[in-house]
Image: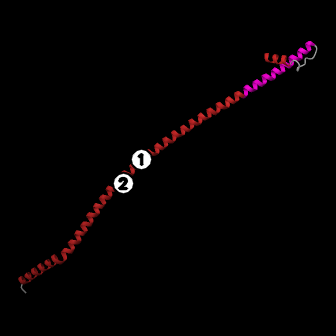
Amino acid sequence: MNINATLLAQTIMFALFVWFCMKFVWPPIMAALEQRKKQIADGLADAERAKHDLELAAKRSAEILREAKEKAGEIIVNAEKRASEIIEADKAKAKIEGERILAGAKAEIDQEVFRAKEQLRTQVSAIALAGASKILGREIDAKAHNDLLDKLVAEI
């Protein structure tokens, strides 16, 4: 065998092999590589979008939390204000009730004082009659001298 013929045959066979690979093997491999490249790019884009969405969600959750804290603070302030209003209203009611009870007690005391004075007047008039009857030496008829006794009681 001649080395030149062998070399020429191997070159032709290599060229046929390259042509066969370029025609039938290379396009499916390139298509698979392109598809894989596209999947990786899509995955990276999705990951970037997810990262951005996560940042937005974190900001939104922080904003919602801040708003919730503000609303809770407002509710607490309103509740404290309402509690103080209720306390003030109850204080006013208690003061009015106390004044009413005090007025009733004063009226009752006035009535008791009036009854005590009337009772004292009656006793004084009875003592005066007893003293006058002893002085005069005879019994004074209370029924007969009722007008005189009423005047005496009124003066006392």
- Categorize mark 1 by other alpha carbons within 10 Å: few (<14), some (14-19), many (20+): few
Does residue 88 appear to the left or right of 67 in the view shown? right
Most foreground residue, 92 or 134: 134
Q: Identify the image quadrant of residue 4.
A: bottom left
Quarter holding the N terminus? bottom left
Does residue 88 appear to the left or right of 114 in the view shown? left
* Residue at the spot 74% in from the left edge and 26% down from the top edge: 111
Most foreground residue, 132 or 67: 132
Up the image or down, 138 lies above or below 77; here it is: above
Up the image or down, 121 lies above or below 76; here it is: above
| Residue marked by disc 2 | 57
Q: Earlier in the sequence, mark 1 or mark 2?
A: 2
Question: Range of the magenta residues?
Answer: 108-136
Do residues under tags 1 and 2 come within 8 Å of each other at their CB atoms?
no
User: What mark, if any, has residue 67 been given in the picture?
Assistant: 1
The nearer-to-camera label among 1 and 2 is 1
- Categorize mark 2 by other alpha carbons within 10 Å: few (<14), some (14-19), many (20+): few
